[in-house]
Amino acid sequence: MADMNREEADAKIGASEARTDSKFATVLARFDALTAAVREMKAEMRNIKMTVILTGVSTGLAVIFGVAGFNASLLNNMLASYDSRKERGQWQSEIRKQSIETELALTRIRKQLDTIDARQAQMSAEFEKIKQERASGRK
């Protein structure tokens, strides 16, 4: 091949520059698209960050209020138990008092029954005596 003339060399260089420019433009377009995607991801990350922060705060508050509610429930149950014991103590003293009164009434009833049994025995003895007197008077 013979030497190229100047115009052919300029044409080849021009074509090469055009290809390079088009490839460079493609790279720049891709870079712009990548930059836009990064910006969009940053915006989404802000939303995700906000969501994570709100979720963490909400979870913390739920735990705090849950523990507070459990403590309040436990305290109420303990107070109810204490009041129940106090009332039970009052009922127990009332039952003891009634038991003592019942015991005293039972003792009085036993004494009366003993008296009645003694009178009955005495009357039975007198009846037998009268019966024997009548039986001996008939003979």
Image (tube, rainbow, N blue to C red):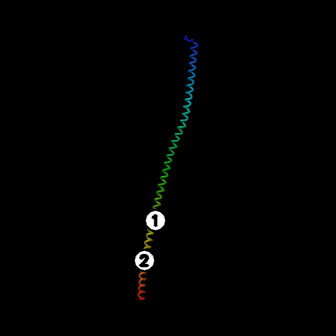
Q: CA distance from mark 2 to mark 1?
A: 32 Å
Query: Residue 95, which numbered label?
Result: 1
Query: Residue 117, which numbered label?
Result: 2
Amino acid of disc 1: Ile
Is the residue 9 above or below the residue 96 in the image? above
- Based on the displayed image, in which of its 4 quarters is residue 10 positioned? top right
Q: Position of residue 42 (x, y in %)?
A: 54, 34
Tag 2, which secondary structure? helix
Is the residue 123 above or below the residue 66 in the image? below
- Quick one: which residue is furthest to the front in this view? 139
Q: Quadrant of the C terminus?
A: bottom left
Tag 1, which secondary structure? helix
Residue found at x 55% / y 35%: 44
Q: Position of residue 135 (x, y in %)?
A: 42, 86
Is the residue 89 above or below the residue 138 in the image? above
Q: Quadrant of the N terminus?
A: top right
Residue found at x 52% / y 41%: 55
Residue found at x 44% / y 71%: 106
Residue found at x 44% / y 67%: 99
